[in-house]
Image (spheres, rainbow, N blue to C red):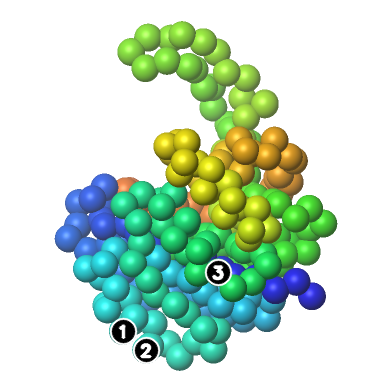
Amino acid sequence: MKEYSFILLSGGIGKRMQLNIPKQFLLLAGKPIFIHVLEKVDEIPEIKEILLPCPVEFLLKTEEIIKDYGFSTPIHCMVGGASRQESVYKALCEAKYENVMIHEAVRPFVSKEEFHQLLYTEKESAIFGLDIPFTVLQGKNQVEGILQRDQLVNVQLPHKYPTKRLLYAHECAREDNLEFTEDASLFFHYYQSPISILKGSEYNIKITKPIDRKIAEAIYKDTILMEGS
């Protein structure tokens, strides 16, 4: 059985939500959003530790909330970086296990089944992704090109990678002063090696804007209804 470190990115500060608290602290069904993720992760025996990078000013609050739920998996809250990429890098430097899984605190609707899919897929590097259901054009103020949506993928999380290989790719990106929005593109940039894409879920949304809160409430009610049926 492979053993994993788990990185839960919790670096948000609520800017796009127009709040004075990080969006991972927002309540969903009476619990902070990130707690919904931790409850699922805590039941996966292959995950041996959880690394949780977060803003320095909310480090103690994050630790206090976690204590209230009595998780059995060791959780190490740490000061995150100035960017998503730096937060992943700092967590990778602390990771103790041969493999690593990465998820975002504001994706509470990831399922245990999706975690298991990722764990047991044969490829050592894998992500979740969805088809893009709309037309995508290249350009900012004017159209400069047409992208073929059947050749594109909407990247979701969680991801998994060999820890040392991903850490090395991050070190290269730091040396090259390159910034990536997520780890699959960073990993592929330096290795050009296949990353398996598993079919994602429409429910696995990222809660970043006010409208997402309303969508999240609807999804939660929908999933409760499905579980009860």
Helix, strand, or loop for circle 1? helix
Amino acid type at mark 3: Ala
Q: Is the Cβ of the residue at disc 2 closer than 8 Å to that at disc 1?
A: yes
Location of mark 1 (residue): 64
Left or right? Give the position of 33 relative to 56. Answer: right
What number is the disc on residue 68?
A: 2
Check disc 2: other Cα within 10 Å, few if <14, some if 14-19, many if 20+: few
Taking the spot 67% from the left edge, 65% from the top edge, the residue there is: 99
The answer to whether any part of residue 27 appears in the image is: no
Q: Nearer the viewer, residue 169 or 27?
A: 169
Q: Earlier in the sequence, mark 3 or mark 1?
A: 1
Could you tell me how many numbered marks the image carries?
3
Q: CA distance from mark 3 to mark 1?
A: 22 Å
Taking the spot 27% from the left edge, 77% from the top edge, the residue there is: 61
Residue 119: percent from left, percent from top = 72, 64
Helix, strand, or loop for circle 3? loop
Check disc 3: other Cα within 10 Å, few if <14, some if 14-19, many if 20+: many
Residue 36: percent from left, percent from top = 47, 72
Amino acid type at mark 2: Asp
The answer to whether any part of residue 67 appears in the image is: yes
Of circles 3 and 1, the one toward us is 3
Amino acid type at mark 1: Glu
Residue at the extreme front? 175
Q: Is the Cβ of the residue at disc 3 closer than 8 Å to that at disc 1?
A: no
Q: CA distance from mark 2 to mark 3?
A: 24 Å
From the viewer's perspective, is residue 169 above or below residue 37?
above
Residue 189: percent from left, percent from top = 60, 35
Residue at the extreme right? 122
Q: Earlier in the sequence, mark 2 or mark 3?
A: 2
